[in-house]
Image: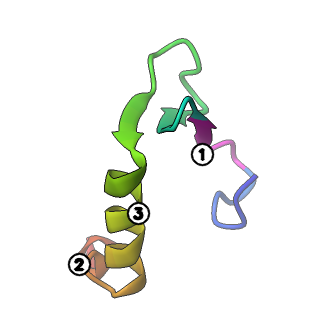
């Protein structure tokens, strides 16, 4: 469980399978996950670490 979920089950599920990163919604486990290449996932994480998405925290 993520330390940011607040314990309410508002988590995302992340897995690596066959070289792809799968991201799913823990509240809707029957839905297909979003699928990203490793490069796409790495680019997103680098952007998050560089504060590129901080505007989402202001909403």
Give the quadrant of residue 59. bottom left
- Residue visible at 41% across and 63% down? 42
- The residue that label 1 is drawn on is 10
Q: For residue 18: magenta?
A: no
Query: Does 8 appear above or below 19?
Result: below
Give the quadrant of residue 37. top left
> Residue 24 at what x, y percent from top left?
51, 33
Magenta stretch: give its range. 8-16
- Residue visible at 59% across and 39% down? 16
* Mark 2, secondary structure of its residue: helix
Tell which of 7 and 36 is nearer to you.
36
Tag 3 or tag 1, which sits nearer the N-term?
Answer: 1
Residue sitting farthest toward the front: 19
Query: Does 51 appear above or below 6?
Result: below
Residue sitting farthest toward the bottom: 50
Report the Cα–Cα distance between label 1 and label 2.
20 Å
* Mark 3, secondary structure of its residue: helix
- The residue that label 3 is drawn on is 42
Tag 2 or tag 3, which sits nearer the N-term?
Answer: 3
- The residue that label 2 is drawn on is 55
* Mark 1, secondary structure of its residue: loop
> Residue 10 at what x, y percent from top left?
60, 45
Query: Does 58 appear above or below 36?
Result: below
Q: For residue 15: magenta?
A: yes
């Amino acid at each position: 469980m993520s330390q940011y979920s607040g314990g309410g089950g508002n988590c995302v599920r992340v897995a690596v399978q066959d070289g792809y990163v799968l991201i799913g919604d823990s509240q809707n486990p029957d839905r297909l996950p979003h699928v990203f290449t490793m490069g796409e996932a790495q680019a997103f994480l680098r952007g998050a670490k560089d504060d590129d998405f901080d505007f989402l925290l202001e909403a």
